[in-house]
Image (cartoon, rainbow, N blue to C red):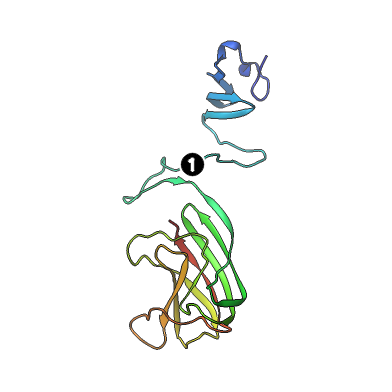
Amino acid sequence: MAYIGKQPASVALASSDITDGIISTAKIAADAITEAKIADDAVLSAHIGAGDFTFPSGSLILGTAGKGIDFSAHGQAAGMTGELLDEYEEGTFTPATSGFSYTYNTGYYKKIGNLVYIQAYVIVDTRTSGSRTSIGGLPFTSESHHADSRYPLSAARWQSLHVSTISIAPFVTNNATTIGMDGEAASASTCDGNIEVWGDDAQMTIAGCYMAA
């Protein structure tokens, strides 16, 4: 005689309960399993009744790209375009620009859905060529909403910059893996574009979020 879980009489399965490998009805304690297909010890599909689902050990593994947790049962804002949480990833990246050598250039990222949080600390050793206004190496290409889709970041603890500046406004550039630099070299009502901050011994901490393509 077959059982699911413990063996109270109410859980016993008869041959009439199984058709082509499908368990048509079964009840475990207060949680009803209305459909479940078992093959090679794997539950291929299951509909669970009331109650929470707990993993005593191990992880939930999604075997198909683009699948995830569907939040469509929740309320939606007027501009909602999606309710599927389909990705999580974390790791490191190397912010760098060709023509530079670095004393330190390590970045960290977390990606939840298509929202990417980054934090990087950069210390330039020397520059022989390459852009003074940007640095590349982001882990994901940014999403493009319009021609000037910039994603503002924050900067801190900068020193030894190539030019004098009173403020820095880094941003992730449109449809790219690059961080650009705006800012103000002096008091002004308009932010200056393409500030030349990177040079020998320049250093900066950069952090913030952007949307990945």
Query: Where residue 148 sits: x, y (%)?
Result: 34, 67
Question: How many marks do you count on the picture?
Answer: 1
Q: Is residue 4 above or below residue 133?
A: above
Q: Is residue 40 above or below residue 20?
A: below
Query: Residue placed at 39% from the left, 65% from the top?
Result: 174
Numbered disc 1: secondary structure = loop
In screen coordinates, is 154 left or right of 30?
A: left
Query: Where residue 125 sits: x, y (%)?
Result: 61, 81
Q: Nearer the viewer, residue 61 or 132?
A: 132
Q: Nearer the viewer, residue 87 or 52?
A: 87
Query: Residue placed at 50% from the left, 75% from the top?
Result: 155
Query: Where residue 202 sits: x, y (%)?
Result: 55, 82
Q: Nearer the viewer, residue 9 or 36?
A: 36
Q: Is residue 11 above or below residue 77?
A: above
The quarter of the rendered structure image containing the C terminus is bottom left
Displayed quadrant of residue 194: bottom left
Displayed quadrant of residue 23: top right
Displayed quadrant of residue 100: bottom right
The residue at which mark 1 appears reads as: 67
Query: Residue placed at 55% from the left, 58% from the top?
Result: 110
- Under mark 1, the amino acid is Lys
**Is the residue marked by circle 1 packed among few (<14), some (14-19), or many (20+) residues within 10 Å?**
few
The quarter of the rendered structure image containing the N terminus is top right
In screen coordinates, is 180 left or right of 54?
A: left
Q: Is residue 72 above or below residue 204?
A: above
